[in-house]
Image: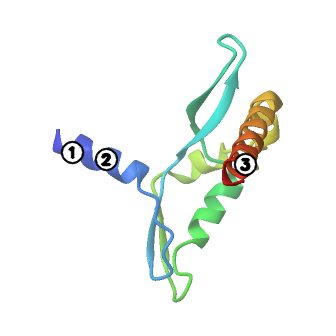
Amino acid sequence: MLLNFLVMFLLFLRLALNAVVFRMSFLMCQYVRYTETTQMSELKEVLISKASAQQRSGRAGRVQDGTCFRLYTRPVYDRFSKYSVPEMLRVPLEELCLHIMVWFLFRVCRIICQV
């Protein structure tokens, strides 16, 4: 039970500190994706891309020399796609428009309430 908790804690731990010298890179990440069958956006775990893996290794040692421990083998890394799918292709445009409309209405209501 404790081991499962520690694994889940490490999977979702995201620190971006300048003093970080060691970095663990996992092979999965979470992205919002639109599913046609349910017509909803949902959070899905997908394999990271090579570009993402390279960026993650760069986070180790921003101020001084650092080390990145990749928790996958070279053959697994070779099967990664070169780049991840851009967010504009993963998330429907309607959702973005609704967020903008809500944000705009919220700002207008704040201005009206202040007057």
Query: Residue 32, how many percent across, how many down?
Result: 63, 35
Q: Are marks 3 and 2 in contact (CB under 8 Å)?
A: no
Q: How many marks?
A: 3
Q: Quadrant of residue 38?
A: top right
Farthest residue to the front: give it.
Answer: 115
Marks 3 and 2, how far apart at CA? 41 Å
Mark 1 or mark 3, whichever is nearer to me = 3
Residue drawn at (57%, 53%), measured in percent from left and top? 74
Mark 1 / mark 3, whichever is N-terminal: 1
Mark 3 / mark 2, whichever is N-terminal: 2
The answer to whether 95 appears left or right of 19 in the picture is right
Q: Amino acid at mark 1?
A: Leu
Secondary structure under the numbered disc 1 in the rendered image: helix
The answer to whether 5 appears left or right of 101 in the picture is left
Q: Amino acid at mark 3?
A: Arg
Q: Are marks 2 and 1 in contact (CB under 8 Å)?
A: yes
Which residue position is annotated with label 3? 107
Query: Residue 75, how many percent across, how many down?
Result: 58, 47
Who is closer to the viewer here, 100 or 14? 100
Residue drawn at (76%, 49%), measured in percent from left and top? 83
Marks 1 and 3, how far apart at CA? 46 Å
Mark 3 or mark 2, whichever is nearer to me = 3
Secondary structure under the numbered disc 3 in the rendered image: helix
Residue drawn at (51%, 89%), measured in percent from left and top? 64
Query: Residue 68, how many percent across, how many down?
Result: 49, 69
Which residue position is annotated with label 2? 7
**Label number found at residue 3:** 1
Q: Amino acid at mark 2?
A: Val
Secondary structure under the numbered disc 2 in the rendered image: helix
Residue drawn at (66%, 45%), measured in percent from left and top? 80
Q: Height in image: 31 above or below 22?
A: above
The answer to whether 11 appears left or right of 16 in the picture is left
